[in-house]
Amino acid sequence: MNILIIGTGYVGLATGIALALKSNKVYFFDKDKEKIKHLSSGQLFFYEPDLQSALEKAISNNRVYFFDMLDKVNEKVDAVFLCIGTPVLKNGKTDLKNIKQAVCDIKKYFGQDIVIAVKSTINPDVFEFIKREFNSNNFHIAVNPEFLREGNALKDTLNPSRIVIGTEDNYAKSMLNNIYRDFDAPKIFTDPISAILIKYASNTFLATKISFINEIANLSDNVGGDIDDIALGIGLDPRIGKDFLKAGIGFGGSCLPKDAKNVIHFSRSKNINLGIIKEAVLINDTQFLVVIEKLKENLGNLKGKVVAVLGLSFKGGTDDLRDSISIKLINELLREGIIVRAQDYLSYEKAKEILKGVFISNDVYMTAKGADAIVIATDWKEYPKADWKKIRNLMKGNLIIDGRNILDKENLKNLGFTYKGIGRK
Ligand code: UDX
């Protein structure tokens, strides 16, 4: 099958490379010429290890082609996957600029029995707009949301928990069923609006689960419980499940915060109040402030104190800084008059452009030097394995605030640290 992918972010590339590995020919289009130049030479422009090697393989097998102009794609295309970003404007509405351009280009250069599968996260009004624009027998529209996690992009795309195909068009339904025939996952055939709501409900449920456990962690901190035991105790109930019950300083990234805010805004325009989701966002907006409280409790006046923040990416295993809680936290620490030193294994260079005047490095030890306190802001797997004895000797103080509850607290206490987790005893 010939497949065109519009948009080469995490979703577009993971989808396209996965389909190329399943023996399709995949044409990628992105209006960003620099990105296309990188990709054509086999280079991802973000960190995603499995995807990098799969891209190289797909190029050498002549399965993928990259374009910065759609009119250069001279092949008959069976399906187009819309994978462009849908940023939210300041007024809370979706910025339709990219979608409008893509719709216009597809109509101009392609036609005749082509399936348009919308992977970008869109609300029902945006879907109605797309449907109206493609109102011709040549175009067959479906909503096919994506559930991949950054850091696992290719694995999640090749082994999805489910494939959702939302369409009222039989041609689109059978084409997408065929495209996904070799994927071992339950397929849910539904209407487009339900497919859209599945995506919003999934991401906001995950967001709510995190805010829920963070709220319980704050209670646990106050009354002397242990959130690890509590999460285990509730997570073993199969109706609740143990995933996404890791307490910390909150969720970030390009999806959970944006999708939650977007669906709240959209629902308000329909006079529907999404109270639970609103509360989940509110809790998340202030959860990181527990770090400031803990610093004050242990260090007193914070002005002039040196704090080393370990982790800048929104989660471990990625270089993505979008909606990173660590960045929000650092800005707040700076407002408190704290001297911040920061570290990340992958995003440290990018972070220098955002956090002017902050010492930023990729080295934990250099960053910890002279610090009164350390704050773990990202769940990098490397942190528990660091040489904490060495870190203790490099620091001026001995306070650790583990904002992701990933360190071995007993070991740290034995090394002379004052350890504070989030809701941990
Ligand atoms: C998320 C969804 O998981 C994915 O299905 C969707 O397609 C895109 O959005 P991603 O943004 O890659 O994926 O990140 P995810 O792994 O979900 O983590 C999101 C945030 O929640 C991170 O900041 C992470 O640190 C935080 N988190 C996650 C917690 O604080 N506690 C948890 O238990 C889990």
Image: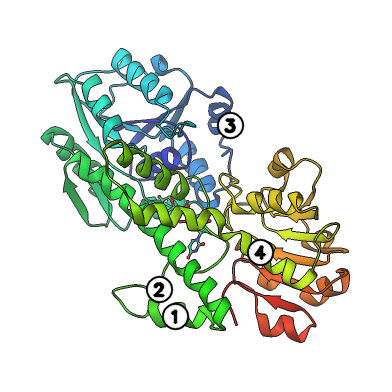
Above or below, 365 against 123 in this view is: below
Quadrant where the image shows the N terminus: top left
Q: Is residue 403 above or below residue 202?
A: below
* Residue 330 percent coordinates (x, y): 70, 52
Circle 3 residue: 38
Evaluate if marks 2 and 1 touch, with contact meaning CB atoms under 8 Å apart: yes
Q: Amino acid at mark 1?
A: Leu
Q: Is residue 100 visible?
A: yes
Q: Which residue is mark 4?
A: 291
Please name the residue that numbered disc 2 is placed on. 242
Local crowd at mark 2 within 10 Å, few (<14), some, or many (≥20)? some
Mark 2 vs mark 4: in front = 4
User: Label 3 crowding class (10 Å Cα cut-off): few <14, some 14-19, many 20+?
Assistant: few
Quarter of the picture holding the C terminus: bottom right
Q: CA distance from mark 2 to mark 1?
A: 7 Å
Q: State which tag comes first along the sequence, 2 or 1.
A: 1
Amino acid on which disc 3 is placed:
His
Which callout, 2 or 4, points at the residue further toward the start of the chain?
A: 2
SS for dot 3: helix
Which residue in the protein does label 1 denote?
Answer: 232
**C-alpha span from label 3 to label 1:** 44 Å
Q: Of tags 3 and 2, which is closer to the observer? A: 2
Amino acid type at image mark 4: Val
